[in-house]
């Protein structure tokens, strides 16, 4: 890993503590790193109308996009209420849209695991499928 995985996972853990998860009590934090080294964080934000909830990964990515990002290099994901915590299908597709290269997770013993998006979303559908 070219980035300090433990530092990124620690940042994701800190942001997970701010999650608004009164229904599931499943607090997740995510930190994205852009190719230029900029870092953006997000946590999950639940809503009584469940469909209006936002996952931590999407929160972090859309925050980066709001600042002009079009590509994400790395995402670190931590769940305070269970390990390991892998992203849901919707989050995997959003990661695919922005070209995430590295996904950092905590394993069951608390160590760092690095996966590629291809590991998590094989044979994925992406922007190039819509190019004519």
Image (cartoon, grey):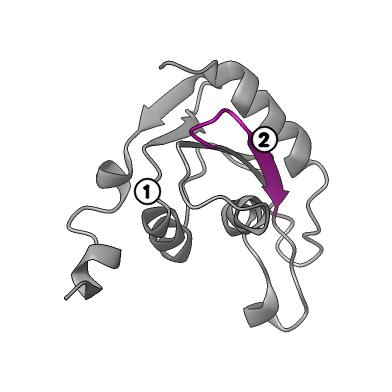
85 up-or-down from 3: above or below? below
48 up-or-down from 127: above or below? below
Q: Residue 94: where, in percent of width, then height?
A: 45, 61
Circle 2 SS class = helix
Residue 51 at least partly seen = yes
Q: Residue at x 73, y 42 (%)?
A: 16
Left or right, 132 with reference to 54: left
Between marks 2 and 1 in the image, the one whose residue lies nearer the viewer: 1
Image quadrant where one finds the N terminus? top left
Label ID, residue 99: 1
Q: Residue at x 66, y 66 (%)?
A: 54
Q: Residue at x 42, y 26 (%)?
A: 113
Q: Quadrant of residue 6?
A: top right
Q: Residue at x 21, y 72 (%)?
A: 131
Residue 41 falls inside the magenta stretch: yes
Q: Nearer the viewer, residue 55 or 83?
A: 55
Left or right, 76 with reference to 97: right
CA neighbours of label 2 inside 10 A, class few (<14), some (14 to 19), many (20+): many
64 up-or-down from 34: above or below? below
Q: Nearer the viewer, residue 1 or 29?
A: 1
Which residue, as the protein is rendered here, is positioned at the far bottom?
Answer: 49
Q: Residue 86: where, in percent of width, then height?
A: 46, 46
The residue range painted magenta reads 34-43
22 up-or-down from 50: above or below? above
Q: Residue 98: where, in percent of width, then height?
A: 43, 53
Circle 1 SS class = loop
Q: Residue 77: where, in percent of width, then height?
A: 56, 39
Residue that numbered label 2 is attached to: 12
């Amino acid at each position: 890993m070219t980035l300090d995985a433990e530092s990124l996972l620690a940042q994701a853990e800190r942001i997970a503590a701010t999650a608004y998860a009164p229904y599931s009590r499943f607090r997740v934090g995510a930190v994205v790193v852009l190719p230029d080294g900029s870092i953006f964080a997000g946590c999950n934000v639940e809503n009584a109308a469940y469909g209006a909830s936002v996952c931590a990964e999407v929160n972090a990515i859309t925050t980066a996009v709001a600042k002009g990002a079009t590509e994400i290099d790395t995402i670190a994901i931590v769940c305070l209420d269970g390990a390991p915590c892998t992203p849901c299908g919707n989050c995997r597709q959003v990661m695919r849209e922005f070209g995430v290269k590295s996904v950092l997770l905590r394993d069951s013993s608390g160590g760092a695991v690095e996966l590629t998006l291809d590991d998590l979303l094989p044979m994925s559908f992406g922007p190039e499928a819509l190019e004519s």
